[in-house]
Image: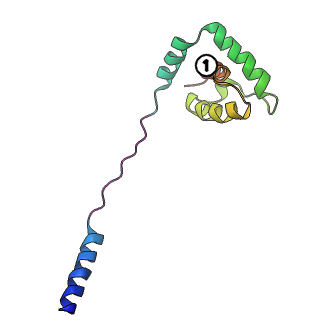
Amino acid sequence: MKLTSYIIIGLSATLFACTAKKATTSSKAPAPAASDIVAEIDSKYTAAQKEEGKIIWQANCQKCHKLYEPQSHTIAKWEKILVRMSKKAKLNDVDAGKVRAYVLTHATS
């Protein structure tokens, strides 16, 4: 009787281990296209606000390092950089948004 129980448990464990694993799906949504990002910025920020962003960017970013021209990186690359650097520069959300608007409008696609 014990032998039969051990065999059943062993076979169950083996079958369980050999079953197909459920494929995991990524929960990340696809990144928006560069043109969509620029269109969103253009709908939210005026040219004057983008110019304010340029001034804020120049005043804050060059305190710690040389300024990289917006054209030096793609929009996707700038998106990653700006999140981190806005925090380091202690920009509030309004100023960070203006800097993002300026930089991404002039970045490469």
Side (left or right) of 85 relative to 4: right
Describe residue 90's horizontal placement relative to residue 22 as left or right. Answer: right
Which image quadrant for residue 7?
A: bottom left
Q: Residues within 10 Å of mark 1 (few under 14, many from 20)?
A: many
Residue 41 placement, left or right of 6 = right
Q: Is residue 40 magenta?
A: no
Query: Which x, y percent locates residue 88?
Result: 72, 35
Number of marks in the image? 1
Image quadrant occupied by the C terminus: top right
Bounds of the magenta segment:
20-30
Q: Against 6, is 75 above or below?
A: above
Question: Could you say which is closer to the camera, residue 87 or residue 38?
Answer: 87
- Circle 1 sits on which residue? 101
Amino acid under label 1? Ala
Question: Main SS of the magenta segment?
Answer: loop
Residue 80: image location, x then y, percent = 60, 35
Front position in the image: 7 or 46:
7
Is 33 drawn above or below residue 98 in the view shown?
Answer: below
Residue at 62% x, 23% y is 100
- Check the picture and name the quadrant holding the N terminus: bottom left
